[in-house]
């Protein structure tokens, strides 16, 4: 009615004035259901019932009938069964100047070492079928890879302040020169932005990860690289101190809020790193254990089967010694074994098929974009 | 119509304060007249000879210490003449914090456009402001407050309007101001969904014309002004590339479009108090960055591939895309009278 009455005047200003006046007075919504609405509701119920019946039939379909379906096209890929997690609350920029940025969650990002590479651009492959569904050209970051810098680590003691600061500055200069990470968290829990967030950084090299819908290869372009000034050597004690964990937590919160990054895509370098020449996962082993996922506000992603194993047939012998990853590796192996059995293939033959898929995928990614991957 | 010397003596003014252009709209004898100036300047070393030439030619300029600042449309001509890059008083939709005279220069350009013989004298003026990009509300508020103070000082009774809403007011009277207004300018892309003239959500993204120019310039090692010229003169967003610059332009246009459509989808997902839209709504594209050939088609294709909770009846370019915001601001100013 309101729209109909507004249409009576052709003068745009009068029409706007009418609508604005009408806005000031309450518009009552119809409270009783019309016959049409009831009909639509009934139709919806019938459709919902039919949909449920169809879904139930699919679920209880006998195994012999499923086995008779056409044979392996390797289109739909096994998905992670874990549910996506809730996004963090809003985090906003409070203050920015030429030295730092301050965010509403207390995060302070030092910006004195910022440098650029090139704007990020990459292809992600569809989990529905890498060879049958189009890849997607993207420019947004979709995840975070956590690293340790494996740099010189002085004892964390007051007497060592000078050494600690010098080591940190030297490290930042090195990282800046090599565009190694987007962020570095130093021993004092300070967060330094090194490579601009819109650009890629050379942090992940040969690497693989996948989420519910997409597969990502060589994550320099698609994932942020966040490095803790730390080493993975057990003799050095816990890799990070509480200040670094706190800084990591609020940095992750900011990045996830700003870029809508799912928690499932926040992973350790060891989980994504691969060696294509020998088809082994875990080429780099930083954070193969002890990454404090929970303290960073994330679920324990060590539990997630490695996509390099399940999707591309990589083996993960280098990571077997890491207790944290063992359940995920066993689950991944089990998944591959079952997929091979379902296709009636010996395990090694199926792995070869998956490895060929990796070869094709990496070739197609290189072919379809002018992005120079860092491998 | 733009850049005429005879300025209308109108009852109200619509003012589009864009990163790359400032546009005014005024109604005179039932027709709306538009004037525009580049929101840019160039500084030249002071010399009496240069100053004399500028005065004689009536080129808008300021003398500040050892420098002469030429602003508005003429800045581009002088930048080419002296082999310099023009600078911007505004950056990403708001006053440029790196230019100390940014507000003063915007004021000079506004004065150049608005006040022929007499200042505002209580005239209604509605000026556009960008919607807040993520995490920068205060920056936008400060920008809005500074512009308002400046315009009030000039004697206008000023109010502001979100740029996307201005597009709705400027282009969607036929749908009773219901629809999505999109303004792709130099610094930002602004979006507003309005229902019967009431804004439901407004936002901006930082990828727009300047982002494309500077990204391609960085990639290809060319000055941004040259990229802008190529973009405006010979680029078609149709997947066929005459050269590597066109290819890079295509890539960054694609990036901008993907980001824009994703942001629209996300805005719908996060919108609270969404009205029940019983029929498909239109979407209007406006601003200088939508003028590239093929822009509308590509935008529509990406939009149609994206799942939105409302049906879109049409995706069209504004009747005069570079004037849509100013026109909408004028409609808003007149409606307040």
Image: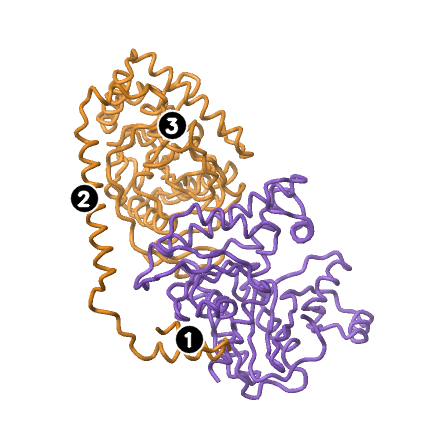
Question: Label 1, on which residue?
Answer: A6
Q: Nearer the viewer, mark 3 or mark 2?
A: 2
Q: Left of A227 or right of it: where is B218?
A: right
Mark sitting earlier along the chain (3/2):
2
Q: Earlier in the sequence, mark 2 or mark 1?
A: 1
Q: Nearer the viewer, residue A354 or B315?
A: B315
Q: Residue at x 29, y 13 (%)?
A: A347
Q: How far is disc 3 from disc 2 in space, using C-alphas?
A: 47 Å
Per the rendering, the mark at residue A273 is: 3
Rendered position, B186 above or below B15: above
Letter of the chain in orange:
A
**Along the line of sight, the residue nearer the viewer: A367 or A20:** A20
Depth check, front residue: A308 or A35: A35
Number of labelled discs? 3
| Callouts 1 and 3 on one subunit | yes
**In the image, A249: left or right of A167?**
left
Chain letter of disc 1 in the image: A
Mark 3 neighbour density, 10 Å: few (under 14) some (14–19) many (20 or more):
many
Q: Give the x, y percent position of residue A14.
A: 47, 80
Looking at the image, tell me whether mark 1 or mark 3 is earlier in sequence order: 1
């Amino acid at each position: 009615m309101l729209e109909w009455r507004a249409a009576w005047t052709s003068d745009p200003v009068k029409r706007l004035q009418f609508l604005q006046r009408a806005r000031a007075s309450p518009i009552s919504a119809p409270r009783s259901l019309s016959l049409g609405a009831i009909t639509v509701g009934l139709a919806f119920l019938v459709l919902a019932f039919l949909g449920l019946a169809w879904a139930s039939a699919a679920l209880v379909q006998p195994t012999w009938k499923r086995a008779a379906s056409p044979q392996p096209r390797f289109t739909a890929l096994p998905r992670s069964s874990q549910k996506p997690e809730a996004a963090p609350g809003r985090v906003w920029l409070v203050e920015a100047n030429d030295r730092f940025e301050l965010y509403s969650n207390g995060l302070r990002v030092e910006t004195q070492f910022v440098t650029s590479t090139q704007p990020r651009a990459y292809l992600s492959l569809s989990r529905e079928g890498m060879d049958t569904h189009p890849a997607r050209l993207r420019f947004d970051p979709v995840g975070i890879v956590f690293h340790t810098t494996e740099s010189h680590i002085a004892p964390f003691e007051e007497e060592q302040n000078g050494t600690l600061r010098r080591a940190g500055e030297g490290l930042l200069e090195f990282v800046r020169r090599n565009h190694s990470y987007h962020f570095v968290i130093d021993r004092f829990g300070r967060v330094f932005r090194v490579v601009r967030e819109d650009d890629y950084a050379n942090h992940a090299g040969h690497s693989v990860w996948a989420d519910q819908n997409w597969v990502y290869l060589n994550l320099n372009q698609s994932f942020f690289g966040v490095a803790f000034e730390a080493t993975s050597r057990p003799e050095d004690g816990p890799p990070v101190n509480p200040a670094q964990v706190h800084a990591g937590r609020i940095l992750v919160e900011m990045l996830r809020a700003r870029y809508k990054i799912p928690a499932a895509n926040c992973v350790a370098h060891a989980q994504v790193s691969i060696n294509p020449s020998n088809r082994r996962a875990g080429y780099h082993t930083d954070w193969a254990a002890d990454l404090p996922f929970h303290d960073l506000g994330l679920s324990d992603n060590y539990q997630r089967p490695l996509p390099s194993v399940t999707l591309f047939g990589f083996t993960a012998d280098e990571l077997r010694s890491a207790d944290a990853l063992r359940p995920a590796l066993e689950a991944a192996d089990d998944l591959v074994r079952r997929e091979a059995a379902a296709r009636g293939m010996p395990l090694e033959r199926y792995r070869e098929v998956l490895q060929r898929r990796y070869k094709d995928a990496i070739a197609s990614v290189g072919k379809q974009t002018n992005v120079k991957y860092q491998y | 119509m733009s850049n005429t010397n005879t300025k209308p003596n109108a009852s109200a003014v619509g003012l589009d304060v864009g990163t790359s252009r400032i546009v005014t709209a005024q109604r005179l004898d039932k027709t709306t007249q538009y004037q525009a100036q580049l929101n840019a300047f160039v500084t030249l070393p002071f010399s009496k000879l240069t100053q004399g030439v500028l005065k004689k030619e009536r080129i808008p300029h300021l003398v500040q210490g050892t420098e002469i600042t030429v602003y508005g449309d003429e800045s581009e001509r002088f930048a080419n003449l002296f082999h310099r890059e023009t600078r911007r008083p505004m950056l990403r939709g708001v006053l440029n914090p790196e230019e100390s005279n940014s507000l003063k220069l915007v004021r000079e350009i506004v004065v150049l456009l608005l006040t022929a013989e007499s200042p505002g004298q209580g005239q209604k003026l509605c000026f556009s402001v960008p919607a807040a990009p993520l995490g920068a509300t205060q920056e936008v508020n400060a920008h809005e407050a500074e512009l308002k103070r400046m315009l009030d000082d000039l004697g206008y009774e000023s109010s502001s309007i979100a740029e996307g809403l201005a597009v709705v007011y400027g282009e969607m009277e036929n749908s009773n101001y219901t629809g999505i207004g999109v303004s792709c300018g130099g610094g930002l892309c602004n979006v507003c969904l309005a229902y019967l003239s009431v804004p439901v959500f407004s936002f901006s993204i930082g990828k727009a014309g300047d982002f494309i120019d500077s990204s391609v310039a960085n990639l290809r090692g060319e000055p941004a002004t040259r990229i802008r010229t190529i973009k405006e003169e010979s680029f078609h967003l149709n997947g066929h590339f005459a050269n590597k610059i066109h290819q890079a332009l295509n890539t960054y246009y694609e990036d901008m479009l993907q980001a824009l459509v994703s942001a629209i989808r996300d805005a719908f997902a996060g919108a609270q108090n969404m009205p029940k839209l019983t029929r498909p709504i239109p979407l209007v594209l406006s601003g200088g960055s939508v003028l590239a050939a093929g822009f509308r088609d590509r935008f529509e294709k990406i939009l149609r591939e994206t799942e939105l909770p409302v049906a879109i009846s049409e995706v069209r370019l504004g009747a005069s895309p570079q004037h849509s915001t100013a026109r909408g601001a004028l409609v808003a100013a007149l409606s307040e009278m």
